[in-house]
Image (spheres, grey):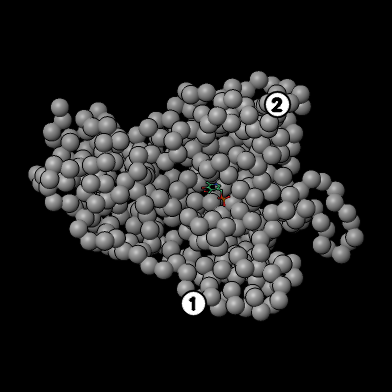
Amino acid sequence: MSKLAIHGGEKVKTTPFGTGKRFGSEELKELTEALEQQTLFYARGQKTKKFREKFAERYGVKHCVMTSSGTASLHAALGAVGVTVGDEVVTSPITDMGSVIGILYQNAVPVFADLKLDTYNLDPASLEACITDKTKAILVVHLAGNPCDMDAIMAIAQKHGIKVVEDCAQSYLSEYKGRLAGTIGDVGCFSLNDFKHISAGDGGMVITYDNELAARLALFTDKCYYRDGSGRNPTFLAPNYRISELQSAVAIAQLGKLDWICERRNEIGDRISEGIKDLPGIYIPKITDGGKSSYWFYMFRVDEEILGISRNDFAKVLSAEGIPAGAGYIPMCVYEYDIFKNKTAYAGGNCPFDCPKYGREIEYKKGLCPNAEEILATSIRLKCNEFFTDEDVEDIIKGIKKVSEYYSANKK
Ligand SMILES: Cc1ncc(COP(=O)(O)O)c(C=O)c1O
């Protein structure tokens, strides 16, 4: 058995990881055209219109509304499906704050359901147990490219007459039983922030088949201004979540690259899983049955008992082998954040949690979602990048193999 790099042995990874340029002449051409329009306003220029058409076409839906961020997309989606003061929205405890910000801004209360230990996505049984007469919507998060178990989730939603908002910020072109994530619930939400599969710096999209929802989304993202010539004045509270023509121009060029980015990430992630699935003390991320992942990142779990090493040390040892590895994803479940624990969403009050329109008691504390906590405590996160070469992928596998075999064989 070869000596570990932390013990002075040779590193597994001796060559640099493959890299590439995300932005190039395609983006520049679109940007130049946008500037030549002499307007950067989404409703006057052609770039936002063009992107909306192309994205809706790629997803096979009727409507796409562009927004200023993934957070804005989710807030607008919640507003459009009718989430309001005193409602509850059930969601995942392992996600970005962007998934819950819109719930709080609608003065609704997030309720966190537990996850499946193997997929890191919502467990339908836990989700159903969270539903009350206050539940207006389910906000599903397709984490890291892996689609949620949508058949089970849609059945629950239909049974209880509640809406489904899909957070696809990490899951472009992810598939569930041949359908694209984002086209199964009432609305699908995307982010164009700089860390996502495609980027416009910032920005986002909401897609839907529903004409009425699309009209509300357009209003919700643009101060409730009716730009339909009807002459109506604003009828409800809506922020300015508009995208600019510059972002849409970049997004058009990025969309041209989306298919190969997601296809390549799918190959890379699935290959890593295949390569490490039988290693001692390693649990690969299970792809939901009937699912296809576009791996925004790659996260596996370790069994500290079998390995005789802590998760944090495993990540350090693997990094020393030249495979950068992070311990976990977010530092704790979202409900453990101070904003929830102390109910401090709004200064000088506990709104929306103690709102009379809500009229219930809710407590956020450690222990609420044991599987989600276990996932965060035992996972190792690796980057997944479409520019990785096949050699990089094999080196990642070799690195994990070297570390897991060393520790399981030398367990103290
Ligand atoms: C799952 C998820 N939802 C929502 C968001 C929010 O997107 P944005 O940063 O564009 O507001 C992110 C961003 O990291 C995310 O990963």
Asked where in the image residue 60 lies, by quadrant, the reply is bottom right
Q: Picture coordinates of residue 86 (x, y %)?
A: 73, 30
**Does residue 129 appear in the picture of this structure?**
no
Residue at the image point whose x is 23% and y is 46% from the top: 320
Q: Picture coordinates of residue 2 (x, y %)?
A: 10, 46
- Residue labelled with disc 1: 25
Q: Mark 1: few, some, or many residues within 10 Å (few <14, many ≥20)? A: few
**Does residue 59 appear in the picture of this structure?**
yes
If the image is split into quadrants, where does the C terminus sit?
Answer: top left
Judge left or right: residue 317 versus residue 20: left
Which-is-in-front pick, marks 2 and 1? 2
Q: Picture coordinates of residue 244 (x, y %)?
A: 66, 64
Residue at the image point whose x is 62% and y is 27% from the top: 343
* Separation of marks 2 and 1 at Cα, in angstroms: 51 Å
Asked where in the image residue 119 lies, by quadrant, the reply is top left
If the image is split into quadrants, where does the N terminus sit?
Answer: top left
Secondary structure under the numbered disc 1 in the rendered image:
helix
Q: Nearer the viewer, residue 37 or 124?
A: 37
Q: Earlier in the sequence, mark 2 or mark 1?
A: 1
Q: Mark 2: few, some, or many residues within 10 Å (few <14, many ≥20)? A: few
Residue at the image point whose x is 71% and y is 76% from the top: 38
Q: Nearer the viewer, residue 396 or 64?
A: 396
Mark 2: amino acid: Gly
Residue lying furthest top in this view? 361
- Residue labelled with disc 2: 349
Q: Picture coordinates of residue 87 (x, y %)?
A: 71, 32
Residue at the image point whose x is 48% and y is 48% from the top: 147
Look at the picture and state if 44 lies above or below 379.
below
Secondary structure under the numbered disc 2 in the rendered image:
loop
